[in-house]
Amino acid sequence: MQRNILKSLLKSSAYPEAVGVVELIQTHVSWIFLAGDTAYKIKKPVDFGFLNFSTIDRRRFYCHEEVRLNSRLCPDIYLGVVEVREAPGGAAFFGDGPIIDYAVKMRRLPAGRMLDQLVARGEVTAADMRAVAKVIADFHLAAATSPAISEYGRRERIMANWQENFAQSAADSPRTPLSSDELEVIREWVSSFVENRAELFEKRIAQGFIRECDGDIHLENICLTNGRIYIFDCIEFNERFRYCDTAADIAFLLMDLDYHRRHDLAEAVLDEYLAASGDAGLPELVDFYKLYRAFVRGKVESFRQNDSGIDPQEQERAGARAAGYFRLARGYIERQRQKATLFITCGLTGSGKSTLAAQLAFELGIATYNSDRVRKQLAALPPDTAIRVPFETGLYSAAASEATYAELLRLAETELAMGRSVIIDACFISRSRRRPFSQLAERLAVRCVVLHCVCPVTEHRRRLVEREAAGENISDGRLEIFELQRDTFQPPDESEGLVVNVATAAAPEALTSPIYARLAP
């Protein structure tokens, strides 16, 4: 759409109702004008293959489809399709000038009540998520199905969607935060899963779980306001993304909660959905479809990253989100491969242990316990309390450290005893500190993996100087402590478990692949 037309639609005079300031939000496929209590959404004339809005006739058709389909879950939000008409100075959403495009007209939902915003602020409860899960389960039970729709549950249809994803990601490889090797790991795992689970996919078809779903249920598309749950912006542009297994539909929300590091809320959603839907076969497929959703979300964010019409800062944020979703997709495969494992970090202060632990915990969906946080919890101190004491004195005395590592050992045993992997994030500079943990792993018959974090001394020093200047860090590590630790550090060896040397000077999203390579069967 011409720039002067977009500018004209930012004027209040372009609207049939009285409005004040008009805001424009862009996605990779739409321009959305927020005008008072109303929103107008114009589809961009783009063709991504799986989505084709390249002609005005297509845009008109899909505007009407958007209203029709979203009325299933938001009957009072979608108001209809309106013309974009030529007007003096550009365009308007009313008048008798020539029609130049079409828009979906909606009631505007409060941005602050979108589920992604509520989750970010910590204002969502398990009860809220159970209510959302119940709405989705009821929607799925009532969703249309037919022999034609059921065909989209066939393995060849599912693999066709995957092959498209792989092709688009490979073509975009210079900007995709997954290497060709990582893409091949995902391709091989997906192909193997689909090939070896023929009976499972056929069973889903026979039991009627392939339905006309929403296709895009993630946190940004859910609003909790005035005691209502609104799930909006479903897939209108391609039947093959909407006709799918109900497991694939709910998996999108579960994956997005994983992405936002709210496994507790994901568990609440899954529990309620299973109870309300009666879908006993869901657990066999849900991780496969979470992987699919994470990969697609990463691909979409890559499109946004490379959309020249989007603000450069938003392009950068989209790139970061793409990296996160792709790494989560990669992590889902490792979750299937790995048995309960005890990971312990090992390295001098400033070596990137906590960054690595956080990234690995995100990808594998497991708990991580940080020694500095635990140490301060035991002393009844807020985790960001700065403690500046001489080496091995006060809160960092031998007795305090002994208590801290004893509590870390207890936490590790609790997780492992429940069959879950865990990461203990601490310096572990001596063999005597590491030995009880390797002995615990041996006693529980689980693998112990020592993540030995290394980086150049100059990088150590740079990080510690920056940390000191920034303040408000859980870690109390500083330059003089680093120098003292260097004199006493005892590197790990294979008698303590599987030792993986991790070069932490790389970006966080590049840290875990070498670990997975070492852990591979």
Image (spheres, rainbow, N blue to C red):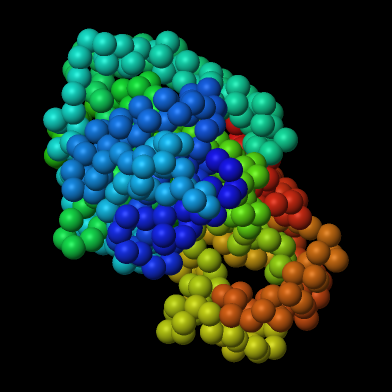
Q: Position of residue 86 (x, y in %)?
A: 46, 43
Question: From what the image shows, is residue 133 above or below residue 477?
Answer: above
Query: Where, by quadrant of the figure, is residue 313 drawn?
Result: bottom right
Count of numbered circles on the image: 0
Q: Position of residue 248 (x, y in %)?
A: 34, 30
Query: In the image, is 410 to the left or to the right of 520?
Result: left
In front: 400, or 309?
309
Q: Position of residue 189 (x, y in %)?
A: 52, 23
Query: In the image, is 263 to the left or to the right of 166?
Result: left
Q: Is residue 480 visible?
A: yes
Query: Residue at coordinates 15% horizontally, 31% vertically from top-left?
Result: 141
Question: From what the image shows, is residue 350 above or below residue 50?
Answer: below
Question: From what the image shows, is residue 458 above or below residue 275?
Answer: below
Q: Position of residue 499 (x, y in %)?
A: 67, 46
In front: 461, or 179?
179
Question: From what the image shows, is residue 266 above or below residue 370?
Answer: above
